[in-house]
Image (cartoon, rainbow, N blue to C red):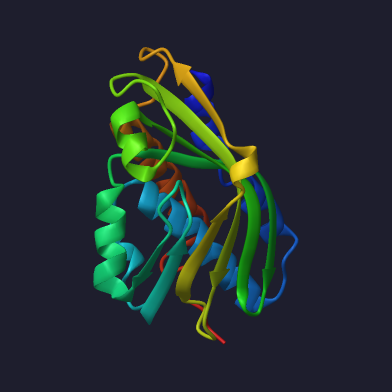
């Protein structure tokens, strides 16, 4: 297992630690929704993310990656956004996460592995289209939730002063297929631990 596989396996450990310290039922439901969302996204199950028990009726996403900030509204738009990055390798680390009635605040290091040609379309300054790069930056994730602990949107703000881009050997790069396998494995463990519909808030 290389360093990138280990990082994907560990990406939700800060959320797990926060859940252990959280007793408020609404806050626990929000964290469990957040936790499940990450594994659904990582495994490519985007329709389940936008289901009525996971997401509010009209989500709004604000994404400031690279040089092209975007606002995405509505479930159709959100699905289009996820499908546009569906083959990317993405994960988070070094989280400073908190939960409140309004939702989740998480300052984290956001990582992606992608060919140079893909990164250029986002606006990242890379030299080689056919090289494989690991990109990382500190980002603030603000995810508002409604009173039913359903996601209302994502506000993703990148600290561009923290951006680090490294070319990596293709043999070291973790593939989208392997990332999906890891998230499916972790999702199964989550479901086994907390039971059916564990993310649904029951006031």
Does 36 sit above or below residue 188?
below
Does 31 sit above or below residue 107?
below
The image shows residue 78 at horizontal and vertical percentages of 31, 66
59 on left or right of 138: left
Is residue 56 something one can see in this rendering? no
Is residue 180 something one can see in this rendering? yes
Front residue of this view, candidates 144 and 117:
117
Quarter of the rendering containing residue 29: bottom right
Quarter of the rendering containing residue 123: top left
Q: Residue at x 53, y 76 (%)?
A: 145
Does 31 sit above or below residue 12?
below
Q: Residue at x 41, y 74 (%)?
A: 60
The image shows residue 9 at horizontal and vertical percentages of 51, 35
The image shows residue 105 at horizontal and vertical percentages of 64, 63
Q: Residue at x 70, y 76 (%)?
A: 24
Does 201 sit above or below residue 35?
below
């Amino acid at each position: 297992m290389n360093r990138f596989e280990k990082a994907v396996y560990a990406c939700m450990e800060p959320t797990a630690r926060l859940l252990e310290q959280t007793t408020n039922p609404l806050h626990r439901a929000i964290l469990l929704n957040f936790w499940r969302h990450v594994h659904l996204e990582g495994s490519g199950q985007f329709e389940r993310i936008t289901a009525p028990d996971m997401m509010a009726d009209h989500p709004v996403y604000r994404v400031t990656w690279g040089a092209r900030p975007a606002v995405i509204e509505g479930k159709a738009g959100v699905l289009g956004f996820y499908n546009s990055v569906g083959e990317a390798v993405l994960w988070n680390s070094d989280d400073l996460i908190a939960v409140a009635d309004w939702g989740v605040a998480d300052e984290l290091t956001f990582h992606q592995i992608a060919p140079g040609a893909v990164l250029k379309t986002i606006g990242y300054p890379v030299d080689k289209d056919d090289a494989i790069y690991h990109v990382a930056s500190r980002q603030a994730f603000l995810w508002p939730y409604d009173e039913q602990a359903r996601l209302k949107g994502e506000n993703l703000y990148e600290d561009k002063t923290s951006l680090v881009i490294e070319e990596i050997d293709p043999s070291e790069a973790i593939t989208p297929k392997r990332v999906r396998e890891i998230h499916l494995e972790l999702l199964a463990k989550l479901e086994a631990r907390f039971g059916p519909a564990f993310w649904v808030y029951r006031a």
